[in-house]
Image (cartoon, rainbow, N blue to C red):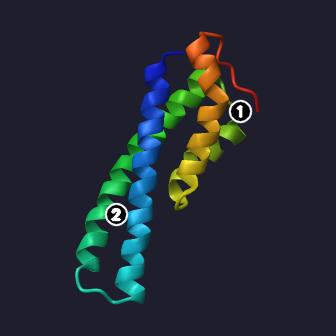
């Protein structure tokens, strides 16, 4: 597997995670703190997160299919972009699991 497939996934995991955390703070500002500009901020961030989450899904699915992950693991990684901060933890776990295999050039068939 090419390292670029893994790098694309990592970048999108972080982008999706940051946008989801920003959206969470925006929602708190809008509904709990009743901040003035929070509505516009939330609208922009939610649109950006929505479109970039689709890109994340494509890249995560591409990584999982190349590594022949079981369906359960694939769903776990795909859904990580929907829970605030989950993308960071899942990305870190996947990175630790795959880093040695990608740099060593060993077959990258993932364990369940």
The earlier-in-sequence mark between 2 and 1 is 2
The reply to whether the C-beta atoms of the residues labelled 2 and 1 are less than 8 Å apart is: no
- Mark number displayed over residue 46: 2
Q: Residues within 10 Å of mark 2 (few under 14, many from 20)?
A: some
Residue 4 placement (x, y as % from top left): 43, 22
Q: Is residue 108 left or right of residue 31?
A: right
Element marked by disc 1: loop
Residue 58 placement (x, y as % from top left): 45, 36
Quadrant housing residue 107: top right
Q: Is residue 65 left or right of residue 28?
A: right
- Mark number displayed over residue 70: 1
Quadrant housing residue 90: top right
Q: Identify which residue is drawn at 31% across, 71% down.
A: 42
Q: Is residue 79 visible?
A: no
Q: Quadrant of the C terminus?
A: top right
- Mark number displayed over residue 19: none
Quadrant housing residue 25: bottom left
Q: Residues within 10 Å of mark 1 (few under 14, many from 20)?
A: few
Q: Identify which residue is drawn at 61% across, 12% down.
A: 104
Q: Quadrant of the N terminus?
A: top right
Element marked by disc 2: helix
Q: Identify which residue is drawn at 56% across, 42% down.
A: 91
Q: Is residue 51 left or right of residue 69?
A: left
Q: CA distance from mark 2 to mark 1?
A: 30 Å
Figure check: 101 above or below 60: above
Residue 62 placement (x, y as % from top left): 50, 29
Residue 83 placement (x, y as % from top left): 55, 60
Q: Is residue 46 left or right of residue 77?
A: left
């Amino acid at each position: 597997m090419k390292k670029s497939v893994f790098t694309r996934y990592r970048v999108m995991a972080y982008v999706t995670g940051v946008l989801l955390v920003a959206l969470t703070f925006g929602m708190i500002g809008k509904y709990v703190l009743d901040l003035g500009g929070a509505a516009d901020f939330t609208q922009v961030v939610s649109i950006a997160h929505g479109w970039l989450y689709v890109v994340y899904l494509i890249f995560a699915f591409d990584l999982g299919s190349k590594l022949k992950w079981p369906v359960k693991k694939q769903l776990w990684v795909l859904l990580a972009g929907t829970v605030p901060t989950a993308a960071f933890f899942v990305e870190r776990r996947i990175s630790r699991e795959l880093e040695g295999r990608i740099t060593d050039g060993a077959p990258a068939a993932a364990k369940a």
